[in-house]
């Protein structure tokens, strides 16, 4: 039997092999130790978890004991995303990433706040199918629950528990940072990117989940896309593209409707009466409305 190897299957030597992963304690380059840990020259050591990720968020850099999304939030988001509910967003983002990577060698991409890894896995699949001559992928998230779920998706990606506030890289090596429904930290992004690097931001636009918000809140504000770009511009980034992706989704059954609420910040904010109205629904048609913005670092 002949094995067929696609010419496009070209993940570049990874972040670890290139000495690009920084020790979170002393910032020196770490190296792989028998596939089981990362170790820096001073002997700081970070074990590889069973699922295949590294924990690079040391206790002195944690603002709380269990930061980021909780285990139930991560599980709810995974069920919704794996059901294909947000597939058009994954397709648009992946297509744009493939275009940005085309013609490049060793294109390095980080999903900053990657959650349970659905979008980065979609990006990996798109790159494999028709991408550049070489690329490497990394995902970080501050939630260990998100990382446990993400790392199981794809062993070719460098996964780490870490914070957008402290990028675990030794050099400005990231050609593209993807930040979806997340928390960009512009100074830290800028330090991790070479000039000419891009950030692809995906944020809720004014009509995002408008039907759900109308049920749970007495009054609903149609705010502009979350996350002002002032901080990005102060750090030197320039917006070069903006695109809106809008479509409707059908949620069927109380469990799926509860999952959608659980994966959003509305779960913490919704008043009791609103929750009860939502819990009574058996079916819900909801608008997904997101803004894709591409920024570049001159
Ligand atoms: C709304 S979720 C989005 C997850 C994923 N990007 C997606 O779209 O499915 C926000 C994520 O950001 C993570 N997060 C919060 N603060 C962070 C930080 N400072 N650095 C990295 N990740 C962070 C949370 O744990 C959570 O997984
Ligand atoms: Zn060290």
Image: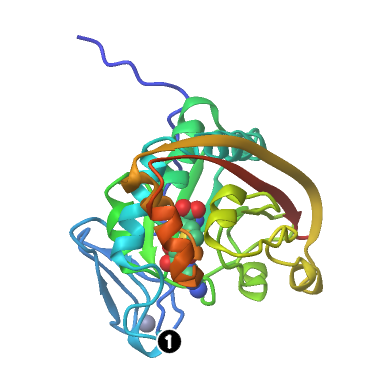
Q: Residue at x 52, y 60 (%)?
A: 216
Q: Residue furthest top?
A: 1
Q: Is residue 241 above or below residue 221?
A: above
Q: Is residue 208 above or below residue 28?
A: above
Residue 257, percent from left and from top: 40, 48
Residue 139, percent from left and from top: 44, 56
Q: Residue at x 59, y 43 (%)?
A: 288
Q: Residue at x 67, y 49 (%)?
A: 207
* Quarter in which the N terminus is drawn: top left
Residue 157, percent from left and from top: 38, 49
247 lies left or right of 124: right
Colouring used for the render: rainbow
Q: Which structural element holds mark 1?
A: loop
Residue, disc 1: 63
Nearer to the camera, 98 or 83:
83
Numbered-mark total: 1
* Quarter in which the C terminus is drawn: bottom right
Which quadrant holds residue 247?
top right
Q: Is residue 60 above or below residue 227?
A: below
């Amino acid at each position: 039997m002949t094995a067929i190897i696609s010419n496009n299957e070209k993940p570049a030597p990874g972040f670890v092999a290139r000495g690009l992963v920084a020790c979170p304690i002393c910032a020196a380059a770490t190296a792989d130790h028998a596939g089981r840990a990362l170790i820096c020259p001073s002997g700081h050591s970070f074990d590889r978890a069973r699922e295949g990720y590294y924990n690079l968020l040391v206790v002195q850099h944690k603002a709380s004991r269990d930061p980021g999304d909780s285990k139930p939030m991560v599980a709810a988001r995974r069920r919704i995303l794996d059901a294909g509910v947000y597939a058009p967003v994954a397709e648009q983002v992946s297509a744009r990433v493939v275009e940005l990577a085309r013609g490049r060698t060793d294109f390095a991409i980080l999903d900053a706040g990657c959650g349970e890894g659905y979008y980065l896995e979609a990006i990996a699949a798109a790159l494999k199918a028709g991408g550049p001559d070489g690329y490497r992928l990394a995902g970080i998230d501050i939630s260990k629950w998100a990382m446990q779920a993400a790392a199981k998706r794809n062993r070719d990606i460098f996964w780490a528990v870490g914070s957008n506030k402290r990028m675990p890289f030794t050099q400005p090596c990231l050609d593209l940072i993807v930040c979806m429904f997340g928390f960009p930290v512009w100074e830290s992004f800028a330090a991790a990117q070479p000039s000419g690097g891009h950030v692809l931001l995906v944020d809720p636009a004014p009509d995002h989940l408008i039907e759900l918000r109308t049920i749970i809140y007495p009054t609903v504000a149609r705010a502009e896309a979350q996350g002002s770009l002032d901080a990005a511009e102060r750090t030197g980034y320039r917006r070069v593209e903006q695109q809106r992706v809008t479509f409707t989704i059908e949620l069927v059954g109380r469990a799926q409707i509860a999952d959608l609420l659980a994966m959003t910040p509305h779960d913490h904010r919704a008043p009791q009466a609103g929750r009860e109205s939502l819990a009574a629904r058996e079916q819900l048609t909801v608008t997904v409305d997101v803004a894709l913005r591409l920024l570049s670092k001159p």
